[in-house]
Image: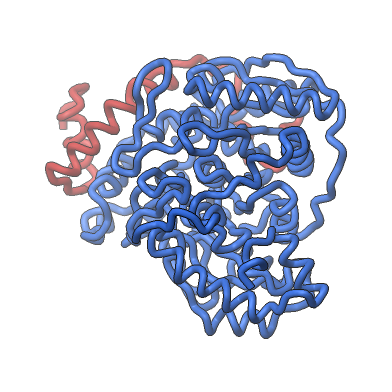
Chain colours: A blue, B red
């Protein structure tokens, strides 16, 4: 059964459908692998074997029939309320059928565990959580990325072949980049969102898949979208490389790998590359943070702030209180910046098909001190990462992180963004990059998944 | 309450105006966040966006209307 565990998501689904793999045996083997590998990773914070077995027993003959997946601690399940990685999440949480749960169930998938996440979804690093941090399978002293830290680490270490995360400001793409996975942030509103504690309030958060490659993301995201994401050719792709610090204030090794991948994409699709400017990109990042902040204030009352759970981290406590001091005029301006950015992108996407830049400007930093060294100097990983991650959440466009290289033994990733509703094009483009590099980076696996250099718990 | 531009006074006065208690650790975090966010917030607020009305209830699943 070990061989089946290491199959891709689509291969597991096909093997089960063909009767070559027994889904019940795969489930038990997956649970055993989680037990074996997870202690060193803390990627999965809870399993519920009986619930998983019940889910399998009732699973319809859908496209993911019998395939084990992990879901982020941001989505309620019928038997478990989400904790949002925190001792207290300042919003109502209760067990229930979230949209992603229903989508997975209806596709026949089996949820085998809940993935760790950064406390309150508030960082790109994954180095803080009520469960303790998740660890990057490529180097357990490095950040797995956040906030979907556990879903990413679980797939990278091949505990499962696919997981469901959430992306409010880059939270699928950062961990995909740090862990060497493919992660799609869907167009706002396309993927299942019901049951999220911010559903109907947030204008930035979406659900989405994290998998080894684009074809697996296509399969899992099709379930989340409730429609088949058809494959296309991505020929003659017009690629716009985003000018400025998001592409230039980048670790040299990351920059070289990303430039190589952009050239790969151009060559593979017979396309063209040009440099493009996005007006007010820097202020768009701040605007995204301020809008997301204002949308999360609903449950934050002085009384709750004065009675926070003592297990909440000091950083989270202070930042929650800081939020109430942000001026409303800045939020109003942020919505105007959103309008400017959306109009600019609509115009830009008449001339280019995809926008390209590194997903993150440096490889995964140490868990203990998540600081990155860039040409402009040292800065926190969060400050550096949000530069490239926020635009898609501000404007609603889809974005994908694609593994394209390695530096210091850690994955390097390219981000592609496209116009609203062109999620399929991003998957096509990611597959073109995979073809161009011989699938070298999507097939690279970290030590625990190679069966070598076992991790110490 | 007197208006003030001093971050220390502004932060503590602001929290007090909402009835929010803060210990020294909270205040240290808030001051650090203030130092990081306040300068760009001032730049944002100073931007002339008078010609750009915000989209009312924008449909973020689509491009903005022309």
Toward the front, the furthest residue is A452
x then y, percent, for residue A376 = 40, 16
Left or right for B47, reference A314: right
Residue drawn at x 44%, y 64% as measured from the top left: A38
In the foreground, B30 or A184 = A184
**In terms of image quadrants, where is residue A327?**
top left
Q: Locate the N terminus of chain B and report the quarter of the image it occupies.
A: top left
Establish if A424 lies above or below A154: above
x then y, percent, for residue A90 = 36, 58
Establish if A166 lies above or below A65: above
Residue drawn at x 78%, y 75% as measured from the top left: A20
Toward the left, the furthest residue is B24
Establish if A441 lies above or below A1: above
Residue drawn at x 74%, y 42% as measured from the top left: A427
| Residue A244 visible in this rendered orientation of the protein | yes
x then y, percent, for residue A297 = 40, 48
x then y, percent, for residue A16 = 75, 73
Left or right for A229, reference A456: right
| Residue A422 visible in this rendered orientation of the protein | no
In the foreground, A80 or A442 = A442
In the foreground, A9 or A190 = A9
Left or right for A275, reference A83: right
Establish if B42 lies above or below A137: above
In the foreground, A202 or A163 = A163
How many marks can you see? 0
Q: Locate the C terminus of chain B and report the quarter of the image it occupies.
A: top right
**In terms of image quadrants, where is residue B30?**
top left
Residue drawn at x 66%, y 58% as measured from the top left: A192
């Amino acid at each position: 059964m070990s061989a089946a565990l290491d199959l891709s998501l689509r291969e597991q689904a096909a093997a089960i459908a063909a009767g070559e793999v027994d889904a019940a045996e795969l489930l038990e083997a997956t649970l055993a692998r989680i037990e074996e590998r997870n202690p060193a990773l803390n990627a999965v914070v809870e399993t519920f074997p009986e619930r998983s077995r019940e889910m399998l027993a009732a699973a319809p003959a859908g496209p993911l029939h019998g395939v084990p997946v992990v879901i982020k601690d941001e989505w309620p399940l019928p038997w478990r309320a989400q904790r949002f990685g925190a001792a207290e999440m300042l919003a109502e949480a209760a067990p229930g059928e979230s949209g992603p749960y229903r989508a997975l169930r209806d596709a026949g998938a089996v949820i085998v565990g809940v993935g760790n996440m950064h406390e309150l979804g508030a960082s790109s690093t994954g180095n803080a959580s009520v469960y303790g941090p998740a660890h990057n399978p490529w180097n357990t002293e490095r950040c797995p990325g956040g906030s979907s830290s556990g879903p990413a680490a679980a797939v990278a270490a091949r505990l499962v072949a696919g997981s469901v995360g959430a992306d409010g400001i880059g939270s699928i793409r950062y961990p995909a980049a740090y862990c060497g996975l493919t992660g799609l942030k869907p167009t706002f509103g396309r993927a299942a969102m019901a049951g999220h504690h911010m559903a109907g309030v947030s204008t930035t958060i979406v659900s989405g898949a994290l998998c080894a490659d684009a074809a697996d993301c296509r399969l899992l995201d099709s379930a989340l979208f409730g429609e088949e994401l058809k494959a296309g050719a991505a020929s003659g792709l017009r690629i716009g490389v985003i000018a400025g610090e998001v592409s230039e204030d980048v670790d040299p090794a990351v920059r070289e790998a990303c430039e190589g991948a952009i050239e790969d994409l151009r060559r593979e699709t017979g396309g063209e590359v040009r440099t493009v400017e996005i007006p007010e990109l820097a202020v768009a990042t701040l605007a995204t943070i301020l809008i997301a902040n204002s949308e999360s204030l609903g449950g934050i009352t002085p009384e709750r702030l004065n009675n926070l759970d003592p297990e909440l981290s000091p950083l989270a406590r202070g930042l929650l209180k800081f939020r109430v001091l942000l001026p409303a005029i800045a939020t109003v301006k942020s919505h105007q910046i959103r309008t400017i950015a959306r109009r600019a992108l609509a115009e830009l996407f008449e001339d280019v098909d995809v926008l390209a830049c590194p997903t993150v400007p440096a490889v995964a930093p140490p868990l203990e001190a998540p600081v990155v060294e860039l040409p402009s100097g040292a800065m926190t990983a969060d400050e550096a990462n949000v530069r490239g991650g926020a635009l898609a959440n501000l404007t609603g466009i889809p974005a994908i992180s694609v593994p394209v290289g390695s530096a210091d033994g850690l994955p390097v990733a390219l981000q592609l963004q496209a116009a609203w509703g062109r999620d399929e094009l991003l998957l096509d483009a990611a597959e073109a990059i995979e073809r161009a590099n011989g699938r070298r980076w999507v097939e690279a696996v970290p030590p625990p998944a190679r069966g070598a250099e076992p991790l110490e718990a | 309450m007197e208006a003030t531009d001093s971050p220390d006074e502004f932060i503590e006065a602001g929290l007090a105006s909402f009835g929010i208690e803060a210990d020294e650790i909270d205040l240290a975090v808030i001051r650090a966040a203030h130092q990081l966010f306040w300068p760009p917030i001032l730049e944002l607020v100073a931007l002339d966006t008078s010609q750009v009305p915000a989209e009312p209830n924008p449909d973020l699943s689509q491009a903005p209307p022309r």
